[in-house]
Amino acid sequence: MRNRGLALTLSEAVLVQRRALLLRAVVDPSGCDGCASCAAICPAEAIAVASVARVHPDKCIACGQCVTSCARAAIRLASFHLSAQVPP
Ligand code: SF4
Ligand code: SF4
């Protein structure tokens, strides 16, 4: 799925909805250099970057675009229950 804002096909929207029930993006602060590539590509504006990126779990739709955008592999999709333990 390429970055096209929120313009999704029906099948893409169903996939995103199903994933969003189970997954959220999670940042490994030790690997993040704060480049903000993930925030720039996020269609849900769910990522804020200060010194490192932070994901707002209520906004994340688990599309995975941030994961593929990160050259440092510092952001991944994880179980919602695990990601809920990461401070916002
Ligand atoms: S793209 Fe990766 S390294 Fe850059 S701010 Fe996001 S998580 Fe951090
Ligand atoms: S998975 Fe998608 S919605 Fe969630 S933070 Fe990454 S780019 Fe944004």
Image (spheres, rainbow, N blue to C red):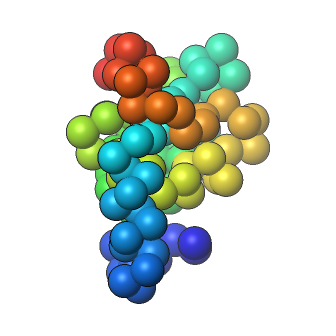
Q: Foreground: 53 or 64?
A: 64
What residue sits 34% from the left and 46% below the top?
Answer: 21
Q: In the rendered view of the protein, which quadrant contains the N terminus?
A: bottom right
Decide if residue 15 is on the left or right side of residue 34: left
Q: Position of residue 40 (x, y in %)?
A: 48, 54
Residue sitting at 43 percent across and 80 percent down? 11
Q: How many marks?
A: 0
Quadrant where the C terminus is found in the figure: top left
Left or right for 84, reference 12:
left
Residue 15 found in image quarter: bottom left
Q: Position of residue 6 (x, y in %)?
A: 34, 73
Q: Position of residue 71 (x, y in %)?
A: 75, 44
Image point (69%, 22%), residue name: 31
68 left or right, relative to 46? right
Please state which of residues 44 and 21 is positioned toward the viewer in this rendering: 21
Image position of 87 with respect to 50: above or below: above
Can residue 15 be seen in this snapshot?
A: yes
Residue 70's place in the image compared with 15, above or below, is above
Please state the horizontal and vertical placement of residue 82, each as a whole percent of the image: 45, 21
User: Quick check: can you spot residue 49?
Assistant: no
Task: Kindly identify the residue that appears in the image at 37 percent across and 83 percent down.
Answer: 10
Q: Nearer the viewer, residue 2 or 23?
A: 23
Q: Is residue 39 above or below residue 3?
A: above
Camera-side residue: 19 or 2? 19
In the image, farthest residue toward the left: 58
